[in-house]
Image (tube, rainbow, N blue to C red):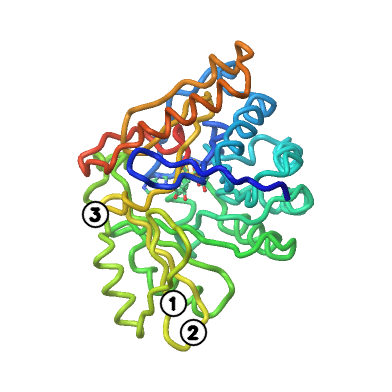
Amino acid sequence: MMANSMLLRDTFGRVIDYIRISITDRCNLRCIYCMPNSGVGLLQKTDILSFEEILKFIEAASEVGIRKIRITGGEPLLRSDLPDFIKSIKALGTIDDISLTTNGQLLEKYAQKLAESGLNRVNVSLDTLNAKRYSDITRGGSLETVLNGIKKAEECGLLPIKLNMVPLRGINDDEIEDFVRIAMTTDYQVRFIELMPVCITGDGDGKGRLVPMEEIMNRLNAMGTLVALKLRRHGPARYYTFENSPGVIGIISGVTCQFCSECNRLRFTSDGKLRPCLFSDIEVDFKTLIRNGASKETLKLLLLNAANLKPEKHDTKFNLTTLSKIGG
Ligand code: SAM
Ligand code: SF4
């Protein structure tokens, strides 16, 4: 692996080494907390960057200190040539870790190719272990299909598998303990993600469905002695295990707590905009530059400037339309 000695630091001294890259705003599900049944206004296909264009961005980013990439969407596996794209990221020789966030509906089909391409691991969104609930929350998704995808990803070595669960009051919050038991009895890591108020159809912005992290922590504490894990850098996540159990549980709270001082990430949207903070409207357009043939040095300069637009902290009264557009 080529040395990547440069560190990207923002104005507040935070080292930025991680970018979440959304490769599409399209999705094959309609999760109730993410988008309305009718879907969201989609980008024109011509506005979505080609993999070649995204690779130009990644190459520049890796030269200013980015080492970790998470590929997300929308549903990233809707782009069937994703394994080839991952191969080309690997071929740069400068990115240490590539992961993927997926709803898992197409994972069984692609897991082998993804593993062969050099993908390191997957996060799979799974909010319930009940088939009817799964179909209701995702508006039509199949629990069996995602479970088969998870099994296949495990067989292919896309490890550790992390399960993302969004607790929703009155919908799946009675399953929090079941998910904890998965973490305690298997190699899967479970991450509870606090609901961000975007749109629960019929529920306004869904704030009534929020299960605060404090409640989740209380419920975890009632199950055993929690031990905080000191992992290297983890942005808005906190990781725990139980005494005498190897399981890992993550708590990701963007709403009720503020971990901004440790935030190490940027987001790149499928139409080529760099978003320094999920909760701020600031976006820096790279698409126009890339399409106009800007040099790598120009992209690097813009990246350095964009990192400095990262706010010190975000306001808890933010305005998010949907994560499927920005890349959750
Ligand atoms: N489609 C893929 C998936 O579902 O894993 C990747 C994109 S999705 C936007 C990424 C993550 O964002 C998922 O784990 C999803 O649960 C989470 N997410 C979406 N809307 C959310 C919301 N309103 N609050 C909290 N998490 C949300
Ligand atoms: Fe699609 Fe993921 Fe949003 Fe669900 S959370 S609608 S799978 S983008």
The vertical placement of 326 against 256, above or below, is above
- Could you classify mark 1 by the number of other residues whose Cα lies within 10 Å: few (under 14), some (14-19), or many (20 or more)? many
Q: Which mark is residue 141?
A: none
Which element type, helix, strand or loop, lies under badge 3?
loop
Which residue matches tag 2? 245
The amino acid on which the numbered mark 3 sits, given as a three-letter code, is Thr
Kindly state the secondary structure of the residue where label 1 is placed: strand
Disc 3 packing (10 Å; few <14; some 14–19; many ≥20): some
Instruction: Determine the residue positioned at 48% across, 26% down.
Output: 273
Q: Residue furthest top?
A: 292
Residue to which mark 3 is pinned: 256
Q: Which residue is mark 1?
A: 241
Q: Position of residue 95 (x, y in %)?
A: 65, 46
Query: Which of disc 3 and disc 1 is earlier in sequence?
Result: 1
Return the residue nearer the eye: 11 or 136.
11
Specify the quadrant of the image occupied by residue 127.
bottom left
Is 78 on the left or on the right of 203, as rendered? right
Name the residue: 61% across, 36% down. Answer: 63
Position above or below: 144 against 294: below
